[in-house]
Amino acid sequence: MFDTRLHAAQQAVGAALAQALTRLPEGPLRDAMGYAAQGGKRLRAFLVLESAALFGIPAAQAMPAAAAVEALHAYSLVHDDLPAMDDDDLRRGQPTVHRKWDEATAILAGDALQTLAFELCAEPVLGPAERRIALVAALAQASGAAGMVHGQMLDIAAETAPVALTLAEITRLQAGKTGALISFAAEAGAILAGTDRAPLAAYAQALGLAFQIADDILDVEGSEEAAGKRLHKDAEAGKATFVSLLGLEGAKARAAALATAAEAALAPYGERAETLRETARFVISRDR
Amino acid sequence: MFDTRLHAAQQAVGAALAQALTRLPEGPLRDAMGYAAQGGKRLRAFLVLESAALFGIPAAQAMPAAAAVEALHAYSLVHDDLPAMDDDDLRRGQPTVHRKWDEATAILAGDALQTLAFELCAEPVLGPAERRIALVAALAQASGAAGMVHGQMLDIAAETAPVALTLAEITRLQAGKTGALISFAAEAGAILAGTDRAPLAAYAQALGLAFQIADDILDVEGSEEAAGKRLHKDAEAGKATFVSLLGLEGAKARAAALATAAEAALAPYGERAETLRETARFVISRDR
């Protein structure tokens, strides 16, 4: 059931992004955007659709928000992979955008994917203007200089810092770098429904941290083939991670505890939130 | 009168941007954003405020939209100056962001300035949610892969093209690269007022092209000291410009004719549009 829903969401959001791109002028910019927005787990889109479903909002109505969060995520990956940032050649098993095209195209494709994300949040099908503008404000908060980009900046600073980060510092960094957008995605349903976001916010906070700890575990234990990207980067770079700070078993225990906390936060929604609970378990058991 | 209004707008939008930045976490990211958003003519902000004034919308109400268009413009300059793009060391008489900090900071500061622009469009003071979401949609249209970024991509392609562009191709390129955002700015007042944008759209189309032709003339005749950036780049790079295609006198005549056309497009607004008319004359007579 969970796999079926996740797979359906992956297909649908891929189609929605492809459809949004057909409205743009043809050429290498659009090609690079489409390439960058392909594949991935679509976890963030899934969270948008499942949190919307919690309030009876059909997938077709919430879809532009799901596509928006994936466009935003894709932009962050394209820029993060640039030579001046993480300098990665491989992403989702394929050459990164600046390797397949060039740096200028990667910078511009990332820029335009960010723009597309906000454009998608304005789509009338999402509902009343009040809800759509709240979505824009929340996405900007989550992804800008107080959210995701702030986390990326802290991450870059950590690479050249003389001493490794503490657990509190890493937690703060990841709350921005990956947590903020995951929180936006999980709260999107409540935003679209115009209702209290608090339970989903608590769920997302635990989920986002569990996600990142699982990422650090995958960086140590995972297969590069399944992950589709270079692994063991953090250990090679001597960067502090949840695994280096908590140990492998400690990290696994912490991730499991956070997934349980995420599930518990959904209590107000009862049975209706079962897929979101399964998502928490999925996040710590995935192989990529 | 014109100078006084322009100066007041420059001061006010600078203060609004500075105020928006104080809400962000301290650090080099915020510093670089503030640095990039300083100075400049603030022509786009001025167009927002003056088009809003046309419909009786006070400057204090329209200010977040004026700040948004300047944040968007600043992001485009920071990314445009990057080594992989135009590779410029000087902007507005100061070192470019990647020279003063580094490339990673410049990429992230540009990214976060774009985000800030959309966040500012969601500010409640701008008016009803319907108007604010229309502003978001218009800004995304103007600045994304069908607008400004599309123009930048065409510009980069032109640099490596075997044959110089034709007048029609340059006009299309500039309509995206600089014209789209100028059009957004000039139409913003009508968007905020929820009224017909057509006269301002016609004004902005002529104004944007006049602006770019004046830029090409400045690139040949201007002083680097006044401009605060490297000039004569296009001639050195063998790129086609309005001057290379029309000749210096031909370009001046075309810019003057466009300014006159821009003024004429404001006829429906009568005397109320006098400052916007002066703006058209200013655009072709400026020295930077």
Image: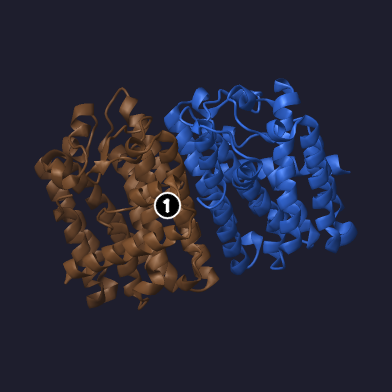
Chain colours: A brown, B blue
Of residue B77 and residue A94, the one placed in the foreground of this image is: A94
**Residue A122 visible from this viewpoint:** yes
Residue drawn at (43%, 60%), measured in percent from left and top? Answer: A22
* x, y percent for residue A198: 37, 65
Q: Relative to residue A101, is residue B192 depicted above or below?
A: below
- Horizontal side of A279 relative to B112 (left or right) equals left
Of residue A39 and residue A174, the one placed in the foreground of this image is: A39
Residue drawn at (67%, 48%), measured in percent from left and top? Answer: B182
* x, y percent for residue B200: 74, 58
Q: Relative to residue B13, is residue A16 depicted above or below?
A: below
* x, y percent for residue A210: 22, 52
- Horizontal side of A185 relative to B63 (left or right) equals left
Label 1 crowd bin: few (<14), some (14–19), many (20+), radius 10 Å: many
Tell me the subunit letter for badge 1.
A
**Residue B27 visible from this viewpoint:** no
* Quarter of the image that includes the C terminus of chain B: top right
Q: In the current view of this chain or complex, which residue is farthest to the front? A: B163
Q: Relative to residue A111, is residue B128 depicted above or below?
A: below
- Horizontal side of B271 relative to A179 (left or right) equals right
Q: Secondary structure at mark 1?
A: helix
* x, y percent for residue A101: 37, 38
Image quadrant assignment for residue B127: bottom right
- Horizontal side of B20 relative to B273 (left or right) equals left
- Give the residue at mark 1: A142
Amino acid marked by disc 1: Ala
Residue drawn at (20%, 56%), measured in percent from left and top? Answer: A283
